[in-house]
Image: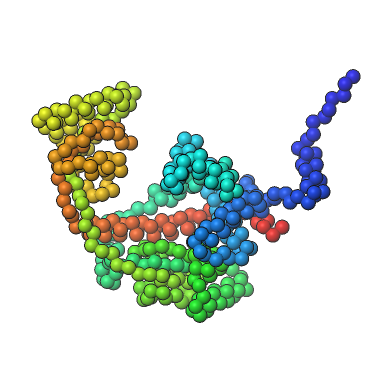
Amino acid sequence: MLAVRRRATPALLLGAVLCASAAFGIELDRIIAVVNDDVIMKSELEDRVRTVEGQLQENGTPAPPRSILEKQVLDRLILTKLQVQMANETGIRVDDETLNRTISNIAADNQVSLDEFRKILEADGYSYERFREEIRSEILISRLRQRQVDNRVTVTEREVENFLATQEHQGEIETEYHLRHILIALPDSPSARQLEEKQELAQKVWNDLKAGADFVQFATTYSDGPQALDGGDLGWRKAGQVPTLFADFVASMQKGDVSELIRSPGGFHIIKLEDVRDSEKVVVTQTHSRHILIRTDELVKTEDAQKRLEQLRLRVVGGDDFGELARGHSHDGVSAAEGGDLSWTNPGDLDPDFEQVMNSLKPGEVSQPFQTQYGWHIVQVLERREHDSTDDVRRAKAREAIRARKLDEARDSWLREMRDEAYVEYRLES
């Protein structure tokens, strides 16, 4: 009788791999953090640390000590894992078509083909498949934040009016600030000893900064804030967009100033006013146009829509009234009632493909049929004008600033709550 060879079990195979690895001195991948029911491997951390180091080097920012950098990157990975887990649990998905289109756009932005982009990644030692999954995670997280946080943040007209009134009263209605930030974070419910240690560290950092130390390097090395690896850069912000905790300090600071130590329940903060600028008068070219839209579906094919618009265009050129044709044929219910009239629009108000065609026309001209994401159109430019949009832009920026501040606060609170409710076990030192 022939003997049947028994299949090795996973445990036996793992034991063989461990023995072989030990015999040849090969370091195995290992778990360095447990995040709920998922794990983060050492290889993941090392890949991400290498990427961050490359970005810091490219920006000319000195990297913090390896141990600090690893901890900062690991904390980011943990938050990413938690958000991806929640996205999956709530049914958010990213299909391959969306993922492929996003990566193709990234390659196009870098002015290379998709194949060239893949080769560049692999030449830099970066796994293309891992890159794909990281982009998938970014899209998942973006959609999750939109659903869980962003869509719930609203800005009222009263808030905009109060914001503008406050800025005008302070003489800062056109002032913007470029800020950097260092956070020495406190643990939840810190002991007296922990509070003392963190305060001593914050005081030392502040003393060194006052003595001339580089703020960017110190932020990268010491800050526990989300922008630490960007040198603590909070970017340009209108007065109303400055975090409430910092607003009074910024108002009295000059360019290059470093604030006093600012205490909050979350820790000790230091901010630097990197630069200040004033907004200028905004004059834009507005366009008054009207259009006819034919949407495609199972009944109206692309060829049918295009042909119908070609016929409508010939009627307009032949003397028929554009407005009457729009009322009778356009699928854009809102503008059709107004004869296709889109009123005066600023640059950026309309679909980019639509604007590109519209901007190529002279007043009175009617376009050939063209396609956008909404369907097929013909558009006629009626007139153009130079318009002082300073007040409109100011209100839009005020709304954007208020929303950005609310988003920052809402996202931070959401992430803290998610982190507090999660099971996270660090194994970085093991």
Residue at the location (41% across, 65% down)? 243
* Relative image position of residue 77 (x, y in whole percent): 57, 53
| Quarter containing the N terminus | top right
Indicate left or right for 192 with 96 as reference. right
Indicate left or right for 111 with 363 as reference. right
Residue 317 or 141: which is nearer the viewer? 317
| Quarter containing the C terminus | bottom right
* Relative image position of residue 415 (x, y in whole percent): 51, 55
Residue 76 or 193: which is nearer the viewer? 76
* Relative image position of residue 86 (x, y in whole percent): 53, 46
* Relative image position of residue 215 (x, y in whole percent): 49, 71
Residue furthest out toward the left? 319
Image quadrant in which you'd find residue 75? bottom right
Residue 19 or 361: which is nearer the viewer? 361
Please indicate, yes or no, whether residue 150 appears anywhere in the rendered image. Answer: yes
Residue at the location (51% across, 59% down)? 58
Residue at the location (26% across, 27% down)? 306
Q: Is residue 269 above or below residue 101?
A: below
Indicate left or right for 161 with 107 as reference. left
Residue furthest out toward the right? 1
Please indicate, yes or no, whether residue 351 appears anywhere in the rendered image. Answer: no
Residue at the location (62% across, 73% down)? 193
